[in-house]
Amino acid sequence: MADADPILIDLKDICFSYPGRGRVLNNLNFCLGKEQRLGLIGPNGCGKSTLMHLLMGLNKPESGTIRILGKTMHGETDFRKARRQLGFVFQNADDQLFSPTVIEDVAFGLLNMGKSPQEAVALSRKMLESLNLSGFENRITYQLSGGEKKLVSLATVLVMEPQVLLLDEPTTGLDERTVERIIRVLNDLDIAYVVVSHEFDFLARTTTDIYAMKNGQIEYRCGSDQFRAAS
């Protein structure tokens, strides 16, 4: 019988350490179900970004199990397949954008998927339009403002139509207007996502459940409405 709410991401007993820093994640357990919108909050160094990097296969756990979309990740080959369904928005947009122009950056992933140049450009233009970025196609990427870079980074991920979206501190350094735009974009999505943020209000407005991380583990969970009231 098919599960009405299948688990998209399932981490069990994950441990991870950086050389010279000691253990960052300590027997951490975490799961994301279909259509769930989860927030992760906690002090700097508690392992929030590390968890995201583990999900993308950018780091390898010392122990524990990572299952993504029903498959256990054993190595780079598994993660390479999983990344096609995971959209990761880096904290620093400059880590995500590398092409000379906006349209080239947004179309890059589609071309790698085998889309024709014409189809990739058409889909990219449609995505930019949906994010109110029409007219940005030929803008020089490195000349964009911080907020514009973040929105373009989001476009490069969403155009790939991922099943899961992962966002690492998406509001860092952004003005209030851009933050409001990102909130609207997230609330209009119909896919599961995980947001790492230190902004209480942002998580309360974009997620349904918030997990607090401390000492390498998820300490507690509450609904966004509860979290907003508590803060």
Image (cartoon, helix red, strand yellow):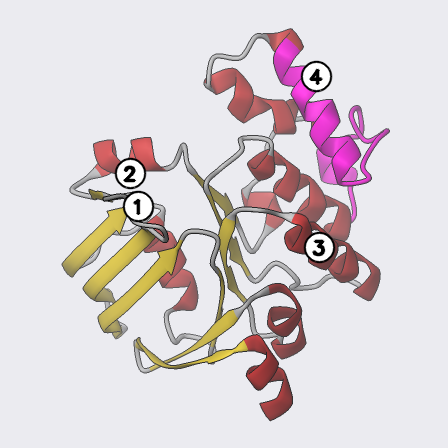
Q: In the image, what residue occupies the spot 76% across and 46% down?
A: 148
Q: Give the range drawn in magenta.
A: 119-145
Say left or right for 94 vs 21: right
Say left or right for 157 vs 35: right
Q: In the image, what residue occupies the spot 27% across and 56% down?
A: 10
Q: In the image, what residue occupies the spot 43% across and 62% down?
A: 49
**Whether residue 231 is visible:** no
The amino acid sitting under disc 2 is Phe
Position of the N terminus, as image quadrant, is top left
Q: Where is residue 145 in the image (x, y as percent from the top left)?
A: 78, 48
Residue annotated with mark 1: 57
Q: Distance between the residues labelled 1 and 2?
A: 6 Å
Q: Position of residue 48 (x, y in %)?
A: 41, 67
* First-in-chain label (4 vs 2): 2
Q: Does the magenta stretch include residue 22?
A: no
The amino acid sitting under disc 3 is Ile
Residue annotated with mark 2: 79
The amino acid sitting under disc 1 is Gly
Q: In the image, what residue occupies the spot 46% across and 78% down?
A: 42
* First-in-chain label (3 vs 1): 1
* First-in-chain label (1 vs 2): 1
* First-in-chain label (3 vs 2): 2
Q: Distance between the residues labelled 4 and 3?
A: 23 Å
The amino acid sitting under disc 4 is Ala
